Amino acid sequence: MNRRQLLSAFSAVAGASILTPELAQAAAQLGQGAASGVDWQVGFADLEADVPRAPMRRIRGRAPAGLAGSLYRNGPGKFHRPGGSVDHWFDGDGLMRAFRIADGGATVEARFVDTPKRRADTAAGAVVTPGFGTAGRPGARVRNNDDVNAANIAVMPVGNEVWALWEAGSPIVMNASDLSTTGIKTLRDDLAHVPFLAHPRRDPGGDIWSLGVSGARALVWRLSPNGGVRSAEMIELPTASYIHDFTATRTHLILILQPWIQDRMVMPYNDSFTWKPDLGVKVLVLDKSDLSRRRTYELPTFFAFHYGSAWAEADGTIRFDGCFTDDPKFATLNGRALMTGAWISQPASQLGMIALHPDGRATLARTGVGAEFPRSDGRMAGTSRRYTVHAASAAPNAPLFHGVATHDWKTGASDAFDFGVHHLVEEAVFVARPGGSDELDGWLLAPSVNTRVRATELHVFDARRLSAGPLCTWRSEHVLPVSLHGVFVKG
Amino acid sequence: MKTLPLIATLLLATVTIAPGARAAEAASLTVTFKGLTARSGSILFTVVNSEDAYNDKARAVTQAILPANADTVSQTFTGLAPGRYAIKAFHDVNGDGKMGMNPFGMPTEPFAFSNKAVASMGPPNWEAAAFELKAGENIRSIDID
């Protein structure tokens, strides 16, 4: 009998009014344990001020030779203000972090993105700016979507800049060396304030693709590696689906249109969307060299935030992985609940593989493995790959995950490490070992919030031996709110 | 003195709207735009004295163009009748004479309204932008850019 069954049994007993005080106390304690027993709220508490660059203390192992560079990560970092707080995790102020590794040591630095939203909310002493799950206050200044840009999802390195990415507004330029904010990036004057998704895809040649989605239309961005606009073409979408991520092969863009459909424009933004499971999922495959050439596939309904890179096989089959749930409940429910310190038990998203077959059929094969934040060896983008790295060991009664794993698509095996329930483990980023070329020859870098000691830690793993545990762990004096997505820049 | 061309007349610091109004009853309005960051193009603005005119359903009192060549630019109008007024303005940075829009219909050039009225997913309404123009001198300052 597991904990959950035991708790149900006690509840039934309590209902029958034969519960003795001792049984009731045991049930209450078990209830707390089953509820989580973990102070996970530590990972969602405000950071009150920027953290100037400071050394981290090495508490386990040693950094591998050859690992040097900066791990930039973004995520919401401030949620509460005296006059009013955000109602959803996704609406916290963007906080850019830099973990810099050199000569076996690591430093951490964290600075808030200086956005019009943060300025307005700071001046008001309240969250007045509307957002994904926050209504905001009537009369808050919203001239365009960059006035509500939380700049809090991901980060893209461009030269000696890092761009804080959101999804419904422009990238925001920061200086990579000190994380000071330069300002909103207008990629082209006539395209000011056109959205730019948080998950751009790089061509093997270095060009950057992204989308600016609004209703049933999307602007397809193609940038050169230095951030200049190569093309910006508008396409029509079959449905006004919420789009957080997309994927691409060497030659095609792949847009996955889930049935969470925008049918009005209200704040909070997510109230503009209606879940229509009867519609199923449409997958749109567009020729990068001619976006009017498209093919549409259909799949049974699912919801997913994140996909992995895609590849085409010799016979034309396109494959890509993702992390799938049955519905957008995290976006609509738990994203709000956890801001109040609560968590509603929900099944973890599952790793799965989609195949788009040349005969027009599409399939989704779920693995049963609880997973989120899928990543891979970036050198394999556009080619067939064997492994997906992902957050693993979903906490049953708390948000996020307490482990990291690599899934082997060839054998179905998992190479995993579990830190235990008191860690909130964030997305792992792969860093190739200089001189190596085999898939996953290198390291995984993953931060965690250690809720027991209330500190942010950074772990380095051998990417091909997660089960051996971290090669090296550094610990910060500070606890930073959990971050979402990052990128490693060598040197 | 040679006659000034019409455009220069518009750009003179003072414009008299109703030169025949009695001095005791007339109001003057100095509109000052502050905080300009782009030093190109012009501020195009409209002065209205009714909700209908504010909503483009009746004629404006006056419309003007101010070159955006300093941090702060201003223009004075005299001979106005006291009452409720509002000002709508945008900075035509690229000088094409119209408000720039991105492909999704979002303005790409700065715009602002009197009375510190803010756009909130659309322009502020007349009630938010309107102010009282009293007899005598009035100065209204608008932050733009």
Image (cartoon, coloured by chain):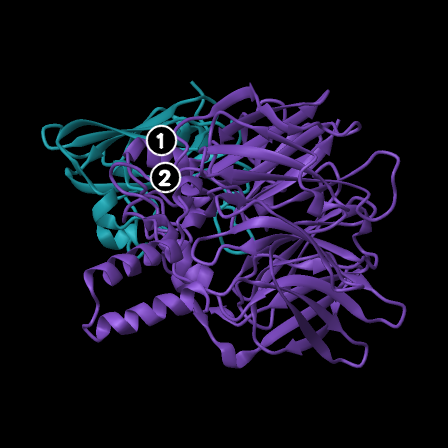
SS category of the residue bearing label 2: strand
Where residue A325 sits in the image (x, y, percent)?
54, 67
What chain does mark 2 sit on?
B
Task: Name the disc covering residue B112, or none.
Answer: 2
Q: Chain B is drawn in which colour?
A: cyan
Q: Name the residue under label 1.
A: B143
Of residues A8 and A85, the one drawn nearer to the viewer in this rendering: A8
The amino acid type found where label 1 is placed reads: Asp
What chain does mark 1 sit on?
B
Of residues B48 and A268, the one drawn nearer to the viewer in this rendering: A268
Relative to residue B6, is residue A109 drawn left or right? right
Q: Earlier in the sequence, mark 1 or mark 2?
A: 2
Q: Chain A is drawn in which colour?
A: purple
Asked whether the residues under the numbered discs 1 and 2 touch, taking CB atoms below 8 Å apart as contact, a structural biologist would say: yes
Q: Residue at x 19, y 34 (%)?
A: B20
Where residue A53 sits in the image (x, y, percent)?
55, 20
Of residues A478 and A173, the one drawn nearer to the viewer in this rendering: A478
Q: Residue at x 30, y 61 (%)?
A: A27
Residue furthest to the left in view is: B24
